[in-house]
Image (cartoon, helix red, strand yellow):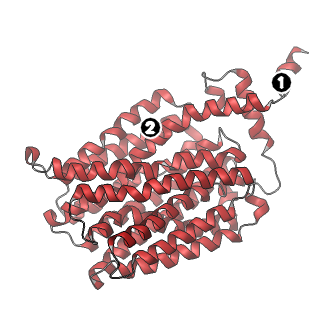
Amino acid sequence: MTQLADTAPLPLSMEAEEQTFRKVAWRLVPFLFLCYVAAYLDRVNVGFAKLQMLDDLQFSSTVYGLGAGIFFIGYVLFEVPSNIILHRVGARLWIARIMLTWGVISGLMMFVKTPTHFYVLRFLLGFSEAGFIPGVLLYLTYWFPAARRGRIVAMFLAAIPVSSIIGAPLSGWILGAFSGLWELRGWQWLFLIETIPSLVLGVIILFYLDNKVADAKWLTDDEKRIITTRLAQETGGHDELSALGDAFRSGRVWLLGVAYFCYACSIYVTSFWLPTLIKGRGVADPLHIGLLTAIPYVVGMVAMYWTNAHADRTRERRWHAAIPCVLAGAGLLLSALPGTPLVFGMLALTLATAGACTALSAFWSLPAAFLTGAAAAAGIALINSLGNLAGFASTSVIGKMSDAFGSTAPGLYLFGTVVLIGGTLVLLVPAKLVNK
């Protein structure tokens, strides 16, 4: 009888369940949030380094665009294998490895002298960081059921706007304040200083993260049972995919991968080109560029949390992902209009950036709703890999078009249209599959 009592499901009270998942959220999300802030800062600070780096090293916009984009080639090549390894060896060791290696390589960017140096280090940075985002998204499925995951993912991905809210003014200040110190230019100090958080957090992960619910000493046995019971209740549906091969055979996974390519174009165009677009409207001071760059991300942070909280309450996922994507595409198109004043340009860029951040966070509730186990590990990584090809395509193409036409406008028109298409593709996924 004792043995049966130990294995019987625990009656779940709403109060106990809320307290348990709140406890898990406070334990995991703020820390993973900080890790992503560091990751995103190291990924996109090249957009600010560009303001000095191109003149110092005599790089063209084409060189910059290719170097910024080649990051994603390395990222895509290793992303699926990385997530499969994480699923097998555990998040603690693997995420720590990711952060420490990308931190070292990001710091080495300060020694770039030639386009080849730039390309090689950006490729290695992508190769090192591969698997971090899909790895964390997979890790969150081990702790939170689908009905709670939208808000959790939104809070984690809020690191994208926060990294820019903090990092943009910081990067602008470093460029101006440190330039010439110890015979180093501001962009070199930028890479050196902003790599330190990744290295510190990479070490802390080894002592802080638990691979699974059963390993968490900070949870009671009853709390562990509440989590595992809730997670078990949402598995086993006939539409769910769990085997490794399911991810590669599923047309829905490939559809979401193509849609995510369109979505990701919006976030990478704004991430890598926003400082340049603001500078192009007559703002010269790096600190002022940084402060203006932060504004769209403040709006984006509020919008992404509200949208995903509303999606969790209503259990509607597709339209909450589609509408912000359409708004992001419209913002990119409006930002390309010639002869508009700074205020109009900032409103358009805010619409594009806030829409991109919101669409990105809302999107990730879709694959997590029908992928579990090994299929989740491979499927989430596959979708993210296809999407991150947009990082290479958007940055390199806009760079080349900017040199060819003397303006970023043609590139913005092109990718604004691509983003609009992405907003419609997610509506092809059956509502019953993802509205959980």
**In this picture, residue 384 sits left or right of residue 177:** right
Where is residue 318 drawn, in percent x and y?
Answer: 68, 63
Horizontal arrangement in the rendering, residue 141 relative to residue 7 (left or right): left
Q: Dot 1, how many residues are within 10 Å of its Cα: few (below 14), some (14-19), or many (20+)?
A: few
Residue drawn 61% across and 50% down? 377
The residue that appears at 70% across and 71% down in the rendered structure is 428
Which secondary structure lies at badge 1? helix
Quadrant that contains the N terminus: top right
Q: Position of residue 358 (x, y in %)?
A: 55, 58
Q: Position of residue 21 (x, y in %)?
A: 67, 34
- Nearest to the observer: residue 382 or residue 331: 331
The number of callouts visible is 2
Residue type (three-letter) at the residue carrying disc 1: Thr
Q: At numbered mark 2, what does the secondary structure look like: helix, strand or loop?
A: helix
Q: Residue furthest right?
A: 1
> Is 388 displayed left or right of 179 in the figure?
right
> Local crowd at mark 2 within 10 Å, few (<14), some, or many (≥20)?
many
Disc 1: which residue: 7
Identify the residue under disc 2. 96
Q: CA distance from mark 2 to mark 1?
A: 34 Å
On the image, the x and y values in percent for residue 381 come to 56, 55
In the image, which disc is placed on residue 286? none
Q: Residue most toward the top?
A: 2
The residue lying toward the viewer, choosing from 347 and 237, is 347
* Front residue (pair 423, 374): 423
What amino acid does circle 2 point to?
Ala
